[in-house]
Amino acid sequence: MAHILPPTPEKLDLYAVLNALADPIRLSIVIDLDKTDDLECGTFNVDVTKSTLTHHFRILRETGVISTTKSGTRSLNRLRRKELNDSFPGLLDSVLKGAKKVGK
């Protein structure tokens, strides 16, 4: 199993993480991953093309919000909750709570 490495917790950039979470598509991906880890890219209910979805996953991965593990042809995604909380305590919970208030 190959692992596509996101930044280590000490290299997470607050501005980049906030920018990644500000996009409605990426936020909906994060909300889904908050419920269940190890979701394949094609299982998210978003109304965008495959190439656009790939772009959103790349942004989330590069900013360190998610990690992706390759298993054969499958790409399994997980939310990096611990790493985000270690770097920015309470940020993820606040963003997810705010998103639920506006009906995301």
Image (cartoon, rainbow, N blue to C red):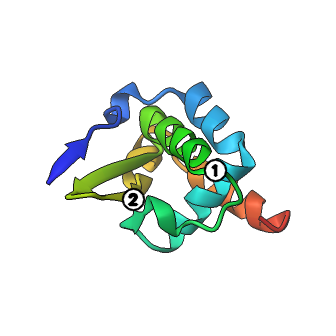
Q: Between residues 65 and 2, which one lies in front from this camera angle?
A: 2
Kindly identify which numbered label has been placed on residue 85. none
Q: CA distance from mark 2 to mark 1?
A: 21 Å
Position of residue 54 measured from the top left corner of the image (x, y, whole percent): 51, 44
Position of residue 78 measured from the top left corner of the image (x, y, whole percent): 39, 59
Image quadrant of residue 8? top left
Q: As shown in the figure, which amino acid type bears the numbered disc 2?
A: Arg
How crowded pointer 2 is (Cα within 10 Å; few <14, some 14-19, many 20+) is rated as many
Position of residue 92 measured from the top left corner of the image (x, y, whole percent): 58, 52
From the viewer's perspective, tell me whether residue 27 is left or right of residue 9.
Answer: right
When the figure is inspected, residue 34 is found, relative to residue 7, above or below; the finding is: below
Identity of the residue drawn at 28% across and 38% down: 5
Q: As shown in the figure, which amino acid type bears the numbered disc 1?
A: Thr
Q: Which residue is mark 1?
A: 49
From the viewer's perspective, tell me whether residue 91 is left or right of residue 39.
Answer: right
Element type where label 2 sits in the image: strand
When the figure is inspected, residue 99 is found, relative to residue 35, above or below; the finding is: above
How crowded pointer 1 is (Cα within 10 Å; few <14, some 14-19, many 20+) is rated as few
Q: Which residue is mark 2?
A: 78
Element type where label 1 sits in the image: loop
Instruction: Please identify the quadrant where the C terminus is shown.
Output: bottom right
In front of the other: label 2 or label 1? 1
Identity of the residue drawn at 47% across and 44% down: 65
In the orientation shown, which residue stands out farthest toward the right? Answer: 102
In the orientation shown, which residue stands out farthest toward the bottom? Answer: 35
